[in-house]
């Protein structure tokens, strides 16, 4: 595991953050109704229903929360979304069932979970064929430019390692969940974060996630799925809904 850092402090590749005040006080505001988030560009009754898969790994639960938010936003935009924690279930025959997949997980020690690497590698042909998106959750993504570069590099390393070429990628700022950690983990995280000049009040949690950016990512990916499906249908000579062909 690397050490925290920021633009002014030493930045160790692969790791960590200094907190961004901009996000630090945004406590978990994951309360928006999915139906409030639907894109209004095309009347929803004209859009075909898409079936999507949202896969995640998580250690402390925050990446699960982000994945659930993405699924809720897409469901609110008339998609059928299956949410899957790969620690519990591995989806079978994904190409036959889904028109797009979102895969995600957090960084620990500058890497994504071996289970996630294995999952992506095992089904690589499928992920490279389907419209796909990957988001990487970390504290580095909540830091200054140096840390954000680290987060991006870890994301690229994951893609290089697996050989996956998703259509969209994003680094998403995670959370420092002191209240959920056990004694040793809390102490260790505090030490690491302190060195980076980050948030060290262990009597509370810090959520750095920009939920608006999460919603945007979810809807933007949905637009890509719709565009690709439309292209495939057009190439196959299928009738295009009038509202989309204007
Ligand atoms: C033991 C541990 C190691 C971590 N290592 C890193 C790391 O190397 N780089 C980073 O940017 N964030 C790191 N983080 C921060 C997590 O990526 C962040 O807390 C994320 O929100 C965790 O998501 P989860 O709740 O889904 O597990 C670490 C967190 C913990 C608890």
Image (cartoon, grey):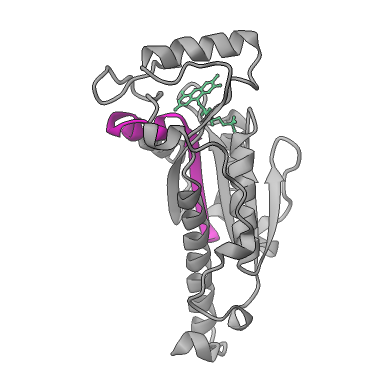
In the image shown, does 240 or 158 lie closer to the viewer?
A: 240
Tell me if I can see residue 200 in this picture: yes
Q: Residue at x 70, y 46 (%)?
A: 84
How many numbered callouts? 0
Residue 41 drawn in magenta? no
**Image quarter of the C terminus:** bottom left
Relative image position of residue 50 (x, y in whole percent):
63, 69
In-front residue for pair 136/41? 41
Relative side of 132 to 152, left or right? right
Vertical order, 80 against 117 (above or below) = below
Q: Where residue 183 sits in the image (x, y, percent)?
A: 64, 9
Above or below 47: residue 160: above
Q: Nearer the viewer, residue 204 or 173?
A: 204
Residue at image point 49% right, 38% down: 26
Looking at the picture, tell me which residue is in the foreground, 40 or 150: 40
Q: Residue at x 71, y 35 (%)?
A: 87
Q: Magenta segment range?
A: 129-150
Residue 154 at least partly seen:
no
- Residue at horizontal 57 percent and vertical 30 percent from the top: 113
Q: Quadrant of residue 58?
A: top right
Q: Give the vertical position of 219 relative to 14 (above or below).
A: below
List x then y, in percent, for residue 145.
Answer: 28, 34
140 vs 91, left or right, is left
Can you name the residue that lies furthest to the left here?
8
What x and y, as percent, mark residue 228?
49, 71
């Amino acid at each position: 595991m690397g050490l925290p850092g920021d633009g002014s402090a030493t930045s160790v590749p692969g790791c960590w953050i200094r907190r961004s005040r901009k996000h630090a006080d945004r406590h978990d505001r994951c309360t928006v109704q999915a139906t409030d988030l639907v894109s209004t560009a095309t009347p929803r009754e004209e859009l075909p229903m898409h079936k999507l898969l949202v896969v995640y790994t998580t250690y402390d639960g925050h990446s699960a929360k982000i994945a659930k938010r993405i699924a809720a936003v897409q469901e609110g935009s008339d998609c059928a979304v299956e949410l899957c924690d790969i620690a519990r279930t591995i989806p079978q025959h994904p190409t036959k069932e889904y028109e797009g997949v979102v895969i995600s997980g957090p960084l620990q020690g500058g890497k994504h979970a071996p289970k996630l690497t294995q999952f992506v590698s095992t089904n690589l042909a499928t992920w490279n064929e389907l419209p796909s998106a990957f988001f990487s959750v970390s504290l580095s993504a909540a830091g200054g430019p140096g840390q954000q570069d680290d987060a991006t590099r870890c994301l690229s390393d994951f893609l290089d390692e697996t050989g996956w070429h998703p259509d969209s990628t994003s680094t998403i700022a995670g959370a420092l969940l002191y209240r959920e950690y056990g004694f040793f983990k809390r102490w260790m995280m505090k030490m690491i974060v302190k060195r980076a000049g980050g948030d060290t009040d262990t009597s509370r949690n810090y959520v750095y996630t920009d939920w608006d950016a999460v919603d945007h990512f979810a809807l933007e990916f949905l637009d890509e799925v719709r565009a690709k499906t439309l292209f495939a249908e057009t190439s196959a000579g299928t009738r295009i809904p009038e509202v989309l062909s204007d």
